[in-house]
Image: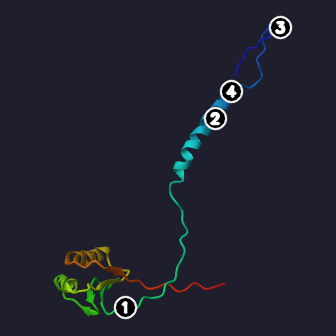
Amino acid sequence: MAFGGFDSRSGSPQPMADINTTPLVDVMLVLLVIFIITAPLLTHAIRLDLPQAQAAASAEKPDTITVSIDAQGRVYWNDAPLADASALEARMREAAARTPQPDLHLRADQQVVYRKVAEVMAAAQQSGLSKIGFVTDPRPAPTQR
């Protein structure tokens, strides 16, 4: 703000009562440019509402092997319990040698630690099984309104 005036007729200078808006406009333009530049960066994450889909349960083909892991970490080969990891690896090597190679369906309890699932997947990969699928329980169909 200025405290002087250009009126020199009066003996004592009076303070100028007008607000100088030039600095205000300059600051607002700078802020506008900053917001224009940074606004696209703030919307980098994409928010999606994914649809819920219903698919028919696939029928198990005869050339499918089911490996199940229960909540305690015990491993089952087609519902038969396995003694240890070496028995699992031996069965996986036998299955990988078959032609055509069977699909491996991995079913794990939701309470099982991820480490156990990763060990089974690593054993399948090392034995040469390449077709691995995860089996889950289907969600109930949504009610139609």
Q: Quadrant of the N terminus?
A: top right
Real-space Cα separation, disc 3 to disc 4, in angstroms: 28 Å
Which residue type does callout 2 highlight? Answer: Leu
- Looking at the image, do the residues carrying marks 4 and 2 touch, with CB atoms under 8 Å apart? no
- Disc 1 or disc 2, which is closer to the eye? 1
Picture coordinates of residue 36, whole percent (x, y): 59, 43
Answer left or right for 55 relative to 75: right
Q: For the C terminus, which image quadrant? A: bottom right
Q: Mark 1 falls on what kind of element?
A: loop
Q: Report the residue marked by disc 3.
A: 10
Q: CA distance from mark 1 to mark 3?
A: 103 Å
Q: Residues within 10 Å of mark 2 (few under 14, many from 20)?
A: few
Indicate the amino acid at tag 1: Glu
Tag 3 or tag 1, which sits nearer the N-term?
Answer: 3
Q: Amino acid at mark 3?
A: Ser
Amino acid type at mark 4: Thr
Rendered residue at 71%/19% (across/down): 2
Alpha carbon distance from label 3 to label 2: 38 Å
Question: Which circle marks residue 22 in the picture?
Answer: 4
Can you tell which mark lies on residue 29? 2
